[in-house]
Amino acid sequence: MYVLVINAGSSSLKYQLLDMSNENAIAKGLCERIGIDGRLVHETDKGKHTADKAMPDHGAAMAIVIDTLLDAEHGVLKSKDEIKAVGHRVVHGGETFTASVLITDEVEKGIEAVSDLAPLHNPPNLTGIRACKQHMPNVPQVAVFDTAFHQTMPEKAFLYAIDYELYKKHKIRRYGFHGTSHKYVSNLAPEMLKRDAKDMKIVTCHLGNGVSLCAVDGGVSVDTSMGMTPLEGLAMGTRCGDIDPAVVQYIMEKECISAQQAGDMLNKKSGVLGISGVSSDFRDLCTAANSGNERAAAAMEVFAYRVAGYIGRYAACMNGLDAIVFTAGIGENDCGIREKVCAYLTWFGVEIDPELNGKRGQALDISKPNAKVRVLVIPTNEELVIARDTKAILKF
Ligand code: ADP
């Protein structure tokens, strides 16, 4: 029973084929430079296969994905009919979508209707859905939203302190993102600790290129650091996160730039890249800091300070804290950042074991045996959440 998971971006299409009898990914890959020239990277047990192939649009990229999955040399399927369903990552569900749904014409219209809230993401997500419908018209498709997990947030967490009419008129409020990742790791943490999710207060830290924290109380999201867009919250690779809103107008006036240019600056040239001037990648920052680059060191300090600050805030908001989970590229791999963050939190009862913190690649409790707050590292698996939701909706 195979589920194909699709994550379509503006010029890329990531895919993963999962065998749901054992939840293993049997093939995964990426079509990139769609609309420019086109390049395929495809991986299976047999190895990695890369090829330059013309991909004028997402429809062409999808045809290449299917051909590759069926290919005698690099493929894993005998027939297209073995794909029972397709699960799509959709970034923004607005207030319309509070859970994953079977895609119908009505749902497509609903995704289109909230596209204003994520103009860079929802239109390519829809393009991916349409490309799959074109090539697999009889295969059911499911949409899984990054925002859905956070729809349980109470009003006090999602309202901005602006004119309420703006919320009513334009749906300007906090939504949150990375929902599939926060859901996956917050489900796994109680299992690892042999505790009931209903009795746990957890802060999940998704630290990747995009960074967001989520307060999970009794198994549901009660607050998260990203807002109406993924720009709010922590300092990220290239995004500024929380900033005095007056700074935006000030930069526009001082630098003589448009609102569009200011938006680009805050999304693409800020965060740890902006502070360091070196890179958005923590491996580069670490190398630079170790060779004496003070701005790179400062960027890492700002990053860790803010993560720790948000954890403290969420401990207050939930009136308790049982566990912290680190996940995604930085959260899973960067033991130095985990150490820096946890060093701020000893007052809460956080104490990590340096040796366990040095391990990699597996789900692990890295706390000292008697530490009050457990600290876990859990590799995230967003594709698996999408495939599981797809299977659950289609009841196979
Ligand atoms: P996204 O899915 O948001 O694109 P990832 O979760 O893959 O991002 O995280 C990517 C980031 O993880 C990289 O930019 C880098 O900063 C960080 N990263 C990946 N591997 C390591 C590592 N071994 N050590 C430190 N940081 C790492």
Image (cartoon, helix red, strand yellow):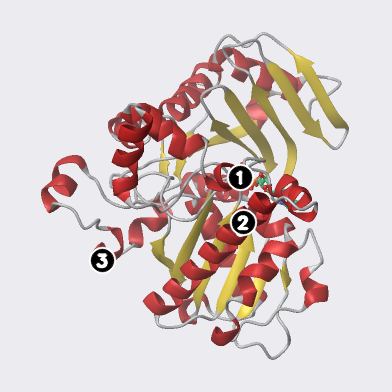
Q: Nearer the viewer, residue 388 or 243?
A: 243
Q: CA distance from mark 3 to mark 1?
A: 31 Å
Q: Earlier in the sequence, mark 3 or mark 2?
A: 3
Considering the numbered disc 2 on the image, is that residue within a helix, a strand or a loop?
A: helix
* Direction from residue 383 to residue 180 in the image, left or right: left
* Residue under label 1: 383
The vertical placement of 79 against 304, above or below, is: above
State the image coordinates of residue 9 (x, y, percent, origin top left).
Answer: 53, 28
Q: Closer to us: mark 3 or mark 2?
A: 2
Q: Amino acid at mark 3?
A: Lys
Residue 142 seen from this side: no
Q: CA distance from mark 1 to mark 2?
A: 34 Å
339 with respect to 110 (left or right): right
Mark 3 surroundings: few (<14), some (14-19) or many (≥20) residues within 10 A: few
Residue 256 visible in image = yes
Q: Residue at x 48, y 53 (%)?
A: 179
Which comes before the other along the chain, label 1 or label 2? Answer: 2
Q: Residue at x 78, y 16 (%)?
A: 51
| Residue where numbered disc 2 is placed | 298
